[in-house]
Structures are given as structure tokens and as C-alpha cells.
Amino acid sequence: MSFQPISDADPVTVVHIICGVCALTVGPIALYSKARAALHRAAGYLWVFAIVLLAGTSFFIEGLEVFGRFGPIHLLSVFALWSVFEAMRQIYRGNIQLHRRIMLNLYWYGVVIAGVFNFLPGRIINRAILGDARAELGYAVIILGLVCLLGWHLKDRRKFLESAAVAGRR
């Protein structure tokens, strides 16, 4: 593991990486701590700030350019910004369930999936964590991450369906 690839990157990319790590680590605290607690709110505001900055900096990072200077990954950034806006709108309206669902989906499908794909060989995170000699291990990390995400999704979906069935019996 070497931080040299990160320190060699341009400043916008470094800010993007820092925000990504912050969003990845603070997200579970915000998402799974007791709602309305001070920790939930503080972590939530930090997480939202990190997400907005993470999505915003992505527009200044060059990569796979398909539409002018933008690529498919920028659609994820637009989705993230919209999700934050919609989640905050829902919490201010008092719709806690929809707020929670949007934030959970943004974390798992936005932050985690995007984070997992940073292990593609040649990416800065792959080079920093795995090194150039083991870059191909990135594919194994991606597969493992996607399998874990699929397991979480199926467990969450089953829990959602069970709670809907219980609510229907009332």
C-alpha cells in the first residue's frame, strides 16, 4: 500500500478521494445511528457535505469522455446531487421513511458501488491499495464487493417485503 499515487494526483482528485473516504466511513454512522440523535444529525450533515463535494468534484475530473467532456460516471454524480436534494426535501416534509430509503440507496448504490469500481486496474485507488504488481486483484475486489452488495440488497428487500406483509395484516 502506497499513498504515492494519491499524492501525485491533481488537487481536485485528491479532494474527491478524501470526500469519498469520508462518505464511505461516515455514512454508516449517519444511516444506522438512532434517528434524531445528535450523532445522527452531525454525521448526517457531514455525510451530505461529503456527498455534495464528492459529486461536485467529479465534474472536474477527466476520464471516460462520451458526451463532450462528460462520461457515464457523471450521471451518477447528477443522481447523487438529486438524491441529496430529494432526501432533504422529504425530511423537511416529515416523510422519514422516504428520507431513509433515499439515503440508504444513495449510500449503497452510489457510494459503495462507485467505490468498488475504483479497484479497476489503472485507477488511482487500485494503484494505492493493491500496487502495480497486484493490480489484477482489483477484479476480485470488485466481484466480492458486488456479491456483498447483492446479499445486502436481497436481505433488505426480504425485510421490506416482510414488513409490508405485516402492515397488510393489520
Image: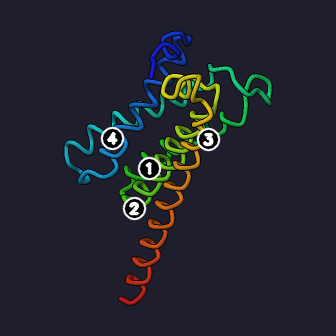
Could you say where residue 159 lies in the image, as x and y percent from the top left? Answer: 41, 72
Decide which of 145, 63 is in the foreground and name it: 145
Could you say where residue 133 lies in the image, as x and y percent from the top left? Answer: 58, 24
Of marks 1 and 2, which one's residue comes earlier in the chain? 2
Of marks 3 and 4, which one's residue comes earlier in the chain? 4
Q: Residue at x 53, y 15 (%)?
A: 5
Closer to viewer: mark 1 or mark 2? 1
Q: Amino acid at mark 4?
A: Gly
Q: Amino acid at mark 1?
A: Met
Q: Amino acid at mark 2?
A: Gln
Closer to viewer: mark 3 or mark 2? 3
> CA gap, disc 4 to disc 1?
10 Å
Q: Which residue is mark 2?
A: 97
Of marks 3 and 2, which one's residue comes earlier in the chain? 2
Closer to viewer: mark 3 or mark 4? 3
Q: Which residue is mark 1?
A: 103
Mark 3 touches mark 2? (CB < 8 Å): no
The quadrant of the rendering that contains the N terminus is top left
Question: Mark 1 Cα within 10 Å, few/some/many (few <14, many 20+)?
Answer: many
Residue 82 visible in the displayed image: no
Is residue 75 shown left or right of residue 124? right
> CA gap, disc 3 to disc 2?
35 Å
Residue 100 visible in the displayed image: yes
Question: Mark 2 Cα within 10 Å, few/some/many (few <14, many 20+)?
Answer: few
Q: Which residue is mark 4?
A: 44
